[in-house]
């Protein structure tokens, strides 16, 4: 039995459909993510799960028990769901220990003290218990908010853009820390974010949303390497599409040569030999190789410390991207050798190639 199950959920504001026929299930102990651009419906969907919004159609079940359907919505406080918000929502007049223990008022004092101490140790703030929120950094405050949400031992934890107020470096580090904390607690959780780096660092499975629908529910690896449609391929990671021609059901020809292990999407497998397709190439699919006869010109480069992200122009004028170790320091305008190293070739039907997106 799934810990959380959404069955064909629809939510509207007036005549505007915000969530449209969404279904997915999350197993106990899994950390999932609703990822997508602003306005895609992910926060509305989270609010439906929390009980803050009714549903127009479909059913939400927690451990097999319906909590939302048309005409019925179990009160949020009865769902045993914890929430962590982007603004932390800590009580400024309470100490850190007081904030963490706020939801434990009905428990005997000794049990409450043990639970608060345990959680502060878990989030690495045991020595901050007597301080007040304004005395802590943003990252520390977010960990306090997490500990407070975990204190009553909810059955499900919802995190709504919890790191958006933090700088990039802290956001990525804290997302890994929070994942470790949730796993140590055995917590089932859903993160809402527009930041795919957070989603990849923290979550076991991701539902990528657009226009109120789940475009693909999958592992981070599959979203990146095996996108199910063009929206997923464009939204996740970086890359370009090269025009190609289908040779057979496992091979496609592109300017870089004949590629094997073809995986066709959205009907391109049915078009047959000779049909035009667009082949997805990620920066890690293109390898710098001085010995290769295939040459490309550097038209843009972005230094990333351990590596450069090069945008390279092929003889036809098409562009690809390549991640290259930073000791290979090539200037814009220089020509370098490249080769393709790709395990599975993703193609979509059509003959309208895209240029590389600048980093």
Image (spheres, helix red, strand yellow):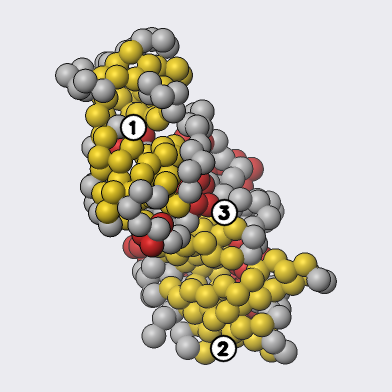
Residue 51 versus residue 254 in the image, above or below:
below
The tag earlier along the polypeptide, 2 or 1, is 2
Q: Is residue 51 left or right of residue 130?
A: right
Name the residue that disc number 2 marks.
66
Can residue 251 be seen here?
yes
Disc 2 on helix, strand or loop?
strand
Can residue 160 be seen here?
no
The location of residue 246, given as percent across then percent down, is 33, 49
Disc 3 on helix, strand or loop?
loop
In the image, farthest residue toward the left: 291
Name the residue that disc number 3 marks.
36
The location of residue 55, given as percent across then percent down, is 68, 79
Residue at image x 49%, y 51%? 230
Total marks shown come to 3
Label pair 1/3, CB-CB below 8 angstroms: no
Cα–Cα gap, marks 1 and 3: 33 Å
| Front one among 355 and 5 | 355
Nearer the observer: mark 3 or 2; the answer is: 3
Residue at image x 72%, y 69%? 17
| Front one among 93 and 2 | 2
The location of residue 146, given as percent across then percent down, is 51, 58
The location of residue 6, given as percent across then percent down, is 53, 78
Name the residue that disc number 1 marks.
255
Specify the quadrant that holds the N terminus: bottom left
Residue at image x 39%, y 68%? 30
Disc 1 on helix, strand or loop?
loop
Label 3 neighbourhood size at 10 Å, few (<14), some (14-19), many (20+)?
A: many
């Amino acid at each position: 039995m799934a810990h959380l199950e959404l069955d064909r959920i629809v939510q509207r504001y007036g005549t505007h459909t915000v969530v449209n026929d969404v279904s997915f299930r999350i197993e106990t102990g899994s950390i999932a993510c609703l990822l997508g651009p602003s306005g895609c419906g992910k926060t509305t969907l989270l609010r439906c799960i929390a009980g803050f919004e009714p549903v127009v159609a479909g059913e939400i079940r927690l451990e097999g028990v319906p909590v939302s359907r048309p005409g019925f919505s179990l009160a949020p406080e009865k769902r045993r769901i914890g929430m962590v918000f982007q603004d932390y929502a800590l009580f400024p007049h309470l100490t850190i220990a007081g904030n963490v223990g706020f939801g434990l008022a009905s428990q005997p004092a000794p049990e409450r003290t043990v639970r608060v101490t345990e959680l502060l140790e878990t989030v690495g703030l045991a020595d901050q218990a007597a301080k007040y929120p304004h005395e802590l950094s943003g990252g520390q405050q977010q960990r306090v908010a997490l500990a407070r949400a975990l204190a009553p031992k909810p059955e499900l934890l919802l995190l709504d853009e919890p790191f958006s107020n933090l700088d990039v470096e802290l956001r990525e580090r804290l997302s890994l820390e929070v994942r470790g904390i949730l796993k140590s607690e055995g917590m089932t959780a859903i993160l809402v974010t527009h930041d795919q780096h957070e989603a990849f660092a923290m979550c076991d499975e991701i539902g990528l949303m657009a226009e109120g629908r789940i475009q693909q529910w999958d592992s981070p690896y599959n979203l990146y390497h095996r996108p199910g449609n063009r929206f997923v391929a464009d939204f996740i990671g970086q890359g370009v599409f090269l025009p190609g021609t289908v040779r057979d059901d496992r091979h496609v020809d592109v300017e870089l040569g004949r590629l094997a292990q073809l995986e066709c999407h959205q009907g391109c497998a049915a078009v047959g030999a000779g049909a035009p397709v667009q082949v997805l190439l990620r920066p890690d699919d293109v390898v710098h190789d001085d010995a290769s006869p295939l040459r490309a010109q550097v038209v843009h480069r972005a230094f990333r410390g351990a590596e450069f992200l090069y945008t390279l122009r092929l003889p036809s004028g098409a562009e690809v991207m390549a991640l290259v170790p930073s000791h290979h320091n090539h200037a814009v305008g220089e020509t370098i050798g490249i080769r393709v190293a790709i395990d599975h070739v993703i193609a979509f039907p059509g003959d309208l190639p895209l240029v590389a997106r600048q980093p």
